[in-house]
Image (cartoon, rainbow, N blue to C red):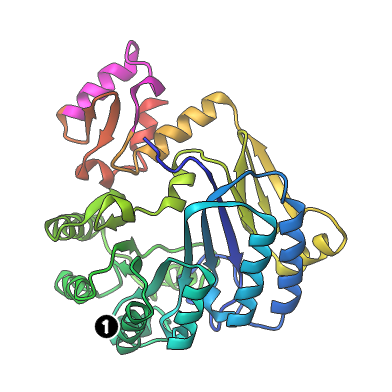
Amino acid sequence: MNPYQKNGLYIHVPFCRTKCPYCGFYSIASTSLISRWLEALKKEVVYYKDRFEYFDSLYLGGGTPTLLSTRDLEKIMQHLFAHFDFVPNTEFTIEANPGDLTSDKADGLKAMGFNRVNLGVQSFNPQELLFLGRSHTGEEAESALKTLRASGFENVGIDLIYGLDGQSLKGWINTLNRTLTFQPEHISCYQLTFEKQTPFWNMRKKGMITPIGEKEERSFFLTTSRFLEEKGYIHYEISNFAREKIYYSHHNYKYWYHVPYLGLGPSAHSFQNKTRWWNFRSIRRYCEALEEHKAPVEGHEDLTNNQMRLESIALGLRTRDGFAIKETDLESQSGDILSRLQISGFLTIKKDRIVPTRKGFLVADHLPLCFQ
Protein backbone atom coordinates (compact mmCIF):
# COMPACT_ATOMS: atom_id res chain seq x y z
CA MET A 1 0.00 0.00 0.00
CA ASN A 2 2.94 2.35 0.49
CA PRO A 3 4.13 4.03 -2.74
CA TYR A 4 7.03 5.74 -0.99
CA GLN A 5 9.52 2.91 -0.61
CA LYS A 6 12.81 4.81 -0.66
CA ASN A 7 14.54 5.92 2.53
CA GLY A 8 13.44 9.04 4.38
CA LEU A 9 15.73 11.66 5.91
CA TYR A 10 14.78 13.75 8.93
CA ILE A 11 16.84 16.58 10.41
CA HIS A 12 15.98 17.93 13.83
CA VAL A 13 16.67 21.64 14.27
CA PRO A 14 16.53 22.07 18.06
CA PHE A 15 16.25 25.86 18.31
CA CYS A 16 13.32 28.18 19.04
CA ARG A 17 12.91 31.83 19.92
CA THR A 18 10.60 30.85 22.77
CA LYS A 19 9.27 27.53 24.03
CA CYS A 20 5.55 26.96 23.54
CA PRO A 21 4.06 25.72 26.85
CA TYR A 22 2.40 22.66 25.23
CA CYS A 23 5.40 21.43 23.21
CA GLY A 24 7.11 18.21 24.26
CA PHE A 25 9.62 18.11 21.39
CA TYR A 26 13.23 18.73 22.32
CA SER A 27 14.46 22.26 21.65
CA ILE A 28 16.06 25.18 23.46
CA ALA A 29 15.01 28.84 23.44
CA SER A 30 18.45 30.07 22.46
CA THR A 31 20.54 30.49 19.32
CA SER A 32 23.96 30.43 21.00
CA LEU A 33 24.78 26.83 19.98
CA ILE A 34 23.70 27.01 16.34
CA SER A 35 27.24 27.17 14.92
CA ARG A 36 28.46 24.26 17.05
CA TRP A 37 25.35 22.20 16.22
CA LEU A 38 25.79 22.90 12.51
CA GLU A 39 29.37 21.61 12.52
CA ALA A 40 28.29 18.51 14.45
CA LEU A 41 25.45 17.90 12.01
CA LYS A 42 27.90 17.95 9.12
CA LYS A 43 29.98 15.29 10.88
CA GLU A 44 26.90 13.14 11.44
CA VAL A 45 25.99 13.37 7.74
CA VAL A 46 29.44 12.06 6.82
CA TYR A 47 29.14 9.30 9.43
CA TYR A 48 26.04 7.89 7.70
CA LYS A 49 26.88 8.74 4.07
CA ASP A 50 27.36 5.10 3.00
CA ARG A 51 24.69 3.46 5.14
CA PHE A 52 21.52 4.63 3.36
CA GLU A 53 21.10 4.42 -0.40
CA TYR A 54 18.83 7.01 -2.01
CA PHE A 55 16.25 9.17 -0.26
CA ASP A 56 12.90 10.30 -1.64
CA SER A 57 11.95 12.56 1.27
CA LEU A 58 13.72 15.13 3.41
CA TYR A 59 11.99 16.72 6.38
CA LEU A 60 13.49 19.58 8.40
CA GLY A 61 11.58 19.72 11.66
CA GLY A 62 12.10 21.16 15.08
CA GLY A 63 12.22 23.27 16.96
CA THR A 64 11.95 26.01 14.39
CA PRO A 65 13.99 25.32 11.23
CA THR A 66 13.17 28.74 9.77
CA LEU A 67 14.84 30.36 12.78
CA LEU A 68 18.10 29.49 11.02
CA SER A 69 19.51 32.06 8.63
CA THR A 70 19.13 31.49 4.92
CA ARG A 71 22.90 31.02 4.74
CA ASP A 72 22.89 28.29 7.42
CA LEU A 73 20.03 26.50 5.69
CA GLU A 74 21.96 26.68 2.41
CA LYS A 75 25.01 25.14 4.12
CA ILE A 76 22.87 22.24 5.35
CA MET A 77 21.33 21.59 1.94
CA GLN A 78 24.68 21.83 0.14
CA HIS A 79 26.22 19.35 2.58
CA LEU A 80 23.32 16.94 2.18
CA PHE A 81 23.50 17.06 -1.62
CA ALA A 82 27.25 16.49 -1.45
CA HIS A 83 27.00 13.29 0.61
CA PHE A 84 23.52 11.79 0.03
CA ASP A 85 21.64 10.78 -3.13
CA PHE A 86 18.06 11.98 -3.67
CA VAL A 87 15.78 10.54 -6.34
CA PRO A 88 13.99 12.79 -8.84
CA ASN A 89 10.80 14.35 -7.44
CA THR A 90 12.01 14.02 -3.85
CA GLU A 91 9.70 15.67 -1.34
CA PHE A 92 11.71 18.40 0.43
CA THR A 93 9.72 19.65 3.45
CA ILE A 94 10.53 22.33 5.98
CA GLU A 95 8.52 23.39 9.02
CA ALA A 96 8.09 27.14 9.23
CA ASN A 97 7.00 29.69 11.78
CA PRO A 98 4.75 32.44 10.36
CA GLY A 99 6.87 35.19 11.89
CA ASP A 100 9.98 34.02 10.01
CA LEU A 101 8.62 34.07 6.48
CA THR A 102 9.69 37.23 4.76
CA SER A 103 9.59 37.29 0.98
CA ASP A 104 13.38 36.90 0.87
CA LYS A 105 13.26 33.91 3.23
CA ALA A 106 10.51 32.18 1.25
CA ASP A 107 12.31 32.83 -2.05
CA GLY A 108 15.49 31.44 -0.52
CA LEU A 109 13.75 28.24 0.60
CA LYS A 110 12.38 27.75 -2.90
CA ALA A 111 15.82 28.31 -4.45
CA MET A 112 17.36 25.71 -2.11
CA GLY A 113 14.98 23.05 -3.41
CA PHE A 114 12.26 22.95 -0.78
CA ASN A 115 8.93 22.15 -2.44
CA ARG A 116 6.72 21.63 0.62
CA VAL A 117 6.23 23.91 3.64
CA ASN A 118 4.36 23.05 6.84
CA LEU A 119 3.31 26.29 8.50
CA GLY A 120 2.74 26.21 12.26
CA VAL A 121 -0.37 28.40 12.36
CA GLN A 122 -2.14 26.55 15.24
CA SER A 123 -4.90 29.19 15.32
CA PHE A 124 -5.94 32.52 13.83
CA ASN A 125 -7.75 33.55 17.02
CA PRO A 126 -5.77 36.09 19.12
CA GLN A 127 -6.93 34.71 22.49
CA GLU A 128 -6.07 31.15 21.45
CA LEU A 129 -2.66 32.18 20.15
CA LEU A 130 -1.96 33.94 23.43
CA PHE A 131 -3.06 30.86 25.40
CA LEU A 132 -0.77 28.65 23.28
CA GLY A 133 2.17 30.98 23.78
CA ARG A 134 2.60 31.58 20.06
CA SER A 135 4.66 34.57 18.98
CA HIS A 136 2.71 35.37 15.80
CA THR A 137 -0.69 36.92 15.18
CA GLY A 138 -3.47 35.65 12.94
CA GLU A 139 -2.68 38.43 10.49
CA GLU A 140 0.97 37.38 10.38
CA ALA A 141 -0.10 33.80 9.64
CA GLU A 142 -2.24 35.01 6.75
CA SER A 143 0.62 37.14 5.46
CA ALA A 144 2.99 34.16 5.61
CA LEU A 145 0.57 32.03 3.60
CA LYS A 146 0.31 34.75 0.95
CA THR A 147 4.09 35.05 0.89
CA LEU A 148 4.52 31.31 0.29
CA ARG A 149 2.10 31.40 -2.64
CA ALA A 150 3.84 34.47 -4.07
CA SER A 151 7.16 32.60 -3.88
CA GLY A 152 5.70 29.78 -5.96
CA PHE A 153 5.02 27.10 -3.33
CA GLU A 154 2.32 24.75 -4.61
CA ASN A 155 2.37 22.34 -1.67
CA VAL A 156 1.58 24.14 1.58
CA GLY A 157 0.47 22.49 4.80
CA ILE A 158 -1.15 24.21 7.78
CA ASP A 159 -0.91 22.86 11.33
CA LEU A 160 -3.80 23.60 13.70
CA ILE A 161 -4.59 22.74 17.33
CA TYR A 162 -8.08 22.16 18.77
CA GLY A 163 -9.50 21.17 22.13
CA LEU A 164 -8.23 24.22 24.00
CA ASP A 165 -9.63 25.11 27.40
CA GLY A 166 -12.71 27.24 26.74
CA GLN A 167 -12.66 26.77 22.95
CA SER A 168 -16.08 26.38 21.35
CA LEU A 169 -16.93 24.14 18.43
CA LYS A 170 -18.21 27.19 16.59
CA GLY A 171 -14.88 28.96 17.11
CA TRP A 172 -13.03 25.91 15.80
CA ILE A 173 -15.18 25.82 12.66
CA ASN A 174 -14.37 29.50 12.13
CA THR A 175 -10.67 28.58 12.26
CA LEU A 176 -11.20 25.82 9.69
CA ASN A 177 -13.14 28.16 7.40
CA ARG A 178 -10.41 30.78 7.63
CA THR A 179 -7.85 28.09 6.83
CA LEU A 180 -9.76 26.98 3.74
CA THR A 181 -9.67 30.47 2.24
CA PHE A 182 -6.00 29.74 1.48
CA GLN A 183 -6.78 26.34 -0.10
CA PRO A 184 -3.86 24.53 1.56
CA GLU A 185 -2.87 21.23 0.01
CA HIS A 186 -2.53 19.67 3.47
CA ILE A 187 -4.08 20.33 6.88
CA SER A 188 -3.00 18.74 10.17
CA CYS A 189 -5.47 19.02 13.06
CA TYR A 190 -4.02 18.01 16.42
CA GLN A 191 -5.91 17.80 19.67
CA LEU A 192 -4.13 19.65 22.45
CA THR A 193 -2.23 17.12 24.56
CA PHE A 194 -0.44 17.51 27.87
CA GLU A 195 3.12 16.23 27.51
CA LYS A 196 5.12 15.48 30.65
CA GLN A 197 7.62 18.11 31.77
CA THR A 198 5.88 20.87 29.81
CA PRO A 199 4.39 23.98 31.48
CA PHE A 200 0.90 22.89 30.41
CA TRP A 201 1.42 19.51 32.12
CA ASN A 202 2.30 21.25 35.37
CA MET A 203 -0.56 23.73 35.02
CA ARG A 204 -2.99 20.85 34.50
CA LYS A 205 -1.75 19.12 37.65
CA LYS A 206 -2.31 22.35 39.59
CA GLY A 207 -5.82 22.74 38.19
CA MET A 208 -4.91 25.87 36.24
CA ILE A 209 -5.99 24.29 32.92
CA THR A 210 -8.93 21.97 32.41
CA PRO A 211 -8.68 19.44 29.55
CA ILE A 212 -11.79 18.97 27.45
CA GLY A 213 -13.91 15.93 28.29
CA GLU A 214 -14.27 12.72 26.31
CA LYS A 215 -17.62 13.80 24.87
CA GLU A 216 -16.09 17.08 23.66
CA GLU A 217 -13.09 15.23 22.21
CA ARG A 218 -15.42 13.05 20.20
CA SER A 219 -17.44 16.02 19.00
CA PHE A 220 -14.38 18.02 17.89
CA PHE A 221 -12.85 15.05 16.09
CA LEU A 222 -15.96 13.88 14.25
CA THR A 223 -16.98 17.42 13.31
CA THR A 224 -13.49 18.12 11.94
CA SER A 225 -13.42 14.93 9.90
CA ARG A 226 -16.88 15.41 8.40
CA PHE A 227 -16.36 19.12 7.74
CA LEU A 228 -13.06 18.75 5.89
CA GLU A 229 -14.19 15.69 3.93
CA GLU A 230 -17.27 17.63 2.82
CA LYS A 231 -14.85 20.32 1.60
CA GLY A 232 -13.04 17.75 -0.53
CA TYR A 233 -10.16 16.75 1.74
CA ILE A 234 -9.11 13.13 2.28
CA HIS A 235 -8.86 12.09 5.93
CA TYR A 236 -5.92 9.78 5.36
CA GLU A 237 -4.47 9.59 8.88
CA ILE A 238 -5.98 10.39 12.27
CA SER A 239 -4.68 13.97 12.35
CA ASN A 240 -3.99 14.56 8.67
CA PHE A 241 -6.04 15.70 5.69
CA ALA A 242 -4.94 16.17 2.08
CA ARG A 243 -6.66 17.82 -0.85
CA GLU A 244 -5.51 15.00 -3.13
CA LYS A 245 -3.57 11.78 -2.65
CA ILE A 246 -0.43 13.34 -4.17
CA TYR A 247 -0.36 15.73 -1.22
CA TYR A 248 -0.15 13.01 1.45
CA SER A 249 3.01 13.50 3.51
CA HIS A 250 5.45 11.18 1.74
CA HIS A 251 7.85 11.43 4.64
CA ASN A 252 5.37 10.39 7.33
CA TYR A 253 4.62 7.23 5.39
CA LYS A 254 8.10 6.02 6.32
CA TYR A 255 7.11 5.93 9.98
CA TRP A 256 3.76 4.23 9.36
CA TYR A 257 5.05 1.46 7.09
CA HIS A 258 8.46 0.54 8.50
CA VAL A 259 10.30 2.10 5.57
CA PRO A 260 13.91 2.89 6.60
CA TYR A 261 14.56 6.46 7.69
CA LEU A 262 17.55 8.31 9.04
CA GLY A 263 17.18 10.95 11.73
CA LEU A 264 19.97 13.47 12.27
CA GLY A 265 20.30 15.94 15.13
CA PRO A 266 19.64 15.81 18.89
CA SER A 267 16.77 13.47 19.90
CA ALA A 268 16.24 12.29 16.29
CA HIS A 269 15.17 8.67 15.71
CA SER A 270 16.21 6.31 12.92
CA PHE A 271 15.04 2.91 11.67
CA GLN A 272 16.67 0.30 9.44
CA ASN A 273 16.63 -3.51 9.24
CA LYS A 274 14.29 -3.95 12.24
CA THR A 275 16.55 -1.77 14.40
CA ARG A 276 15.46 1.58 15.82
CA TRP A 277 17.94 3.97 17.42
CA TRP A 278 17.83 7.49 18.82
CA ASN A 279 20.24 10.33 19.50
CA PHE A 280 21.02 12.14 22.73
CA ARG A 281 18.28 14.53 23.80
CA SER A 282 20.87 17.20 24.47
CA ILE A 283 22.64 19.53 22.05
CA ARG A 284 25.82 19.51 24.13
CA ARG A 285 26.01 15.71 24.44
CA TYR A 286 25.17 15.37 20.75
CA CYS A 287 27.94 17.78 19.76
CA GLU A 288 30.48 16.31 22.19
CA ALA A 289 30.00 12.80 20.78
CA LEU A 290 30.53 13.92 17.19
CA GLU A 291 33.48 16.12 18.15
CA GLU A 292 35.04 12.93 19.59
CA HIS A 293 34.28 11.12 16.30
CA LYS A 294 31.57 8.97 17.93
CA ALA A 295 27.98 8.36 16.89
CA PRO A 296 25.64 10.51 19.05
CA VAL A 297 23.40 7.50 19.75
CA GLU A 298 21.84 7.26 23.20
CA GLY A 299 20.05 3.92 22.73
CA HIS A 300 18.60 1.37 20.34
CA GLU A 301 16.17 -1.53 20.15
CA ASP A 302 16.05 -4.57 17.88
CA LEU A 303 12.47 -5.48 16.99
CA THR A 304 11.30 -9.08 16.81
CA ASN A 305 9.03 -10.26 13.99
CA ASN A 306 6.10 -10.19 16.41
CA GLN A 307 6.91 -6.64 17.50
CA MET A 308 7.07 -5.61 13.85
CA ARG A 309 3.67 -7.23 13.27
CA LEU A 310 2.08 -5.51 16.26
CA GLU A 311 3.52 -2.15 15.21
CA SER A 312 2.16 -2.65 11.68
CA ILE A 313 -1.30 -3.20 13.16
CA ALA A 314 -1.10 -0.26 15.57
CA LEU A 315 0.23 2.16 12.94
CA GLY A 316 -2.10 0.86 10.24
CA LEU A 317 -5.13 1.52 12.42
CA ARG A 318 -4.17 5.20 12.39
CA THR A 319 -4.43 5.43 8.57
CA ARG A 320 -7.16 4.99 5.98
CA ASP A 321 -5.07 2.17 4.45
CA GLY A 322 -5.34 0.01 7.56
CA PHE A 323 -3.23 -3.13 7.73
CA ALA A 324 -3.00 -6.45 5.86
CA ILE A 325 -5.31 -9.23 7.02
CA LYS A 326 -2.31 -11.58 7.02
CA GLU A 327 -0.98 -9.68 10.06
CA THR A 328 -3.61 -11.33 12.23
CA ASP A 329 -4.91 -14.89 12.65
CA LEU A 330 -8.55 -15.00 11.59
CA GLU A 331 -8.76 -18.69 12.50
CA SER A 332 -8.31 -17.82 16.16
CA GLN A 333 -10.08 -15.49 18.55
CA SER A 334 -9.05 -12.57 16.35
CA GLY A 335 -11.63 -13.63 13.78
CA ASP A 336 -14.49 -13.31 16.28
CA ILE A 337 -13.14 -9.99 17.53
CA LEU A 338 -12.90 -8.67 13.97
CA SER A 339 -16.52 -9.63 13.30
CA ARG A 340 -17.70 -7.79 16.41
CA LEU A 341 -15.65 -4.71 15.52
CA GLN A 342 -17.17 -4.70 12.02
CA ILE A 343 -20.69 -5.00 13.39
CA SER A 344 -19.98 -2.17 15.84
CA GLY A 345 -18.80 0.04 12.98
CA PHE A 346 -15.16 0.45 14.03
CA LEU A 347 -13.58 -1.48 11.17
CA THR A 348 -14.30 -2.61 7.64
CA ILE A 349 -12.54 -4.95 5.22
CA LYS A 350 -11.38 -3.68 1.83
CA LYS A 351 -9.85 -6.35 -0.38
CA ASP A 352 -7.09 -7.88 1.75
CA ARG A 353 -6.89 -5.13 4.36
CA ILE A 354 -8.55 -4.28 7.66
CA VAL A 355 -9.39 -0.58 7.59
CA PRO A 356 -10.59 1.71 10.42
CA THR A 357 -13.74 3.77 9.94
CA ARG A 358 -14.07 7.35 11.16
CA LYS A 359 -15.54 5.87 14.34
CA GLY A 360 -12.55 3.53 14.49
CA PHE A 361 -10.14 6.46 14.33
CA LEU A 362 -11.68 7.68 17.59
CA VAL A 363 -10.43 4.59 19.44
CA ALA A 364 -7.31 3.87 17.36
CA ASP A 365 -5.11 3.74 20.47
CA HIS A 366 -7.21 0.90 21.90
CA LEU A 367 -8.05 -1.16 18.80
CA PRO A 368 -4.57 -2.76 18.44
CA LEU A 369 -5.07 -4.47 21.81
CA CYS A 370 -7.81 -6.55 20.18
CA PHE A 371 -5.30 -8.21 17.83
CA GLN A 372 -2.49 -9.08 20.20
Along the line of sight, the residue nearer the viewer: 26 or 234? 234
Q: Is residue 169 left or right of residue 193?
A: left
Residue at 35 percent of width and 73 percent of height: 122
Residue at 49 percent of width and 70 percent of height: 202
Mark 1 secondary-structure assignment:
loop
Can residue 266 be seen from the camera position used here?
Answer: no
Position in image of residue 295 (x %, y %): 78, 53
Along the line of sight, the residue nearer the viewer: 58 or 274? 58
Mark 1 is on which residue type? Answer: Asn
Which residues, given as a range, are shown in magenta? 323-342
Residue at 19 percent of width and 28 percent of height: 342
Q: Is residue 256 left or right of residue 70?
A: left
224 is higher (above) or lower (below) than 235? below
Position in image of residue 214 (x %, y %): 25, 55
Can residue 228 be seen from the camera position used here?
Answer: yes
Q: Is residue 330 left or right of residue 198?
A: left
Residue at 29 percent of width and 48 percent of height: 236
Image quadrant in which you'd find residue 319: top left
Position in image of residue 58 (x %, y %): 53, 58
State the quadrant of the N terminus: top left
State the quadrant of the C terminus: top left
Circle 1 residue: 125
Q: Is residue 341 magenta?
A: yes
